[in-house]
Amino acid sequence: MAISTLFVRTEPRRRRYGVAAIIGIAAGIISAFVKWGAEVPLPPRTFSGGRDALNPPYLFLRDYLGIDPTHAIYTFSEHVINPVVVTHIIFSLVFAVGYCVVAEIFPKVKLGQGILAGLIVTVVVHGIFCPALHLSPPLAQLPVDEYLSEILGHIFWFWVIELMRRDLRNRITHEPDAEVAFT
């Protein structure tokens, strides 16, 4: 497949941006729980080699938004919950809405039922942005366990987003995806 085919666009009249945004909100919330669930058997961070217990969302809140997560907590079912949980949902919403809208324009983003997008996000976020913002060490300094957790977690995350996107778009619009021609 030629690189140029990755940027083939759908016909503008077939795009449904509003539907994509609504689906992205639903998929973002549900997929955030999927991503957390993947972190139970495969924790994303180790704390060996002198690394402290502060994860990237915690550091982002503290260093870039000026929110001290240790002071902004809430209690649910007698458990103290850190607002990093809310940050994960917000990140998931942003990525899911973005993915669903981009899928309306560039259908190749859906390659592998969203798995390719999950891999790209892993590389861009954890390989470029987190180290650039000093939210995590460079990839070369991370243990293989962390790579494995993030890669699998992002694959599951985006696969669920794509499953929801395609099913809900078809149910809401009663049409196939934008790149599929009517017969």
Image (cartoon, rainbow, N blue to C red):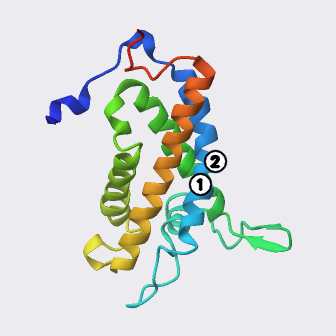
Examine the image and state in which quarter residue 114 appears: top left
In this view, 131 is above or below 34: below
User: In the visual, does 36 lie left or right of 2?
Assistant: right
Q: Residue at x 58, y 73 (%)?
A: 40
Q: Nearer the viewer, residue 94 or 1?
A: 1
In this view, 106 is above or below 15: below
Q: Amino acid at mark 2?
A: Ile
Residue 84: x and y, percent?
62, 64
Q: Tell me the residue that label 2 is attached to.
A: 29
Q: Residue at x 51, y 19 (%)?
A: 16
Cα separation between marks 2 and 1:
5 Å
Dot 1: element: helix
Q: Nearer the viewer, residue 168 or 25?
A: 168
Residue 149: x and y, percent?
44, 70
User: In the visual, does 166 lie left or right of 83?
Assistant: left
Q: Quadrant of the N terminus?
A: top left
In this view, 158 is above or below 24: below
Does any portion of residue 113 appear in the rendered image?
yes
Residue 32 is marked as 1
Q: Evaluate if marks 2 and 1 touch, with contact meaning CB atoms under 8 Å apart.
A: yes
Q: Residue at x 53, y 51 (%)?
A: 91
Residue 99 is marked as none
Q: Nearer the viewer, residue 73 or 37?
A: 37
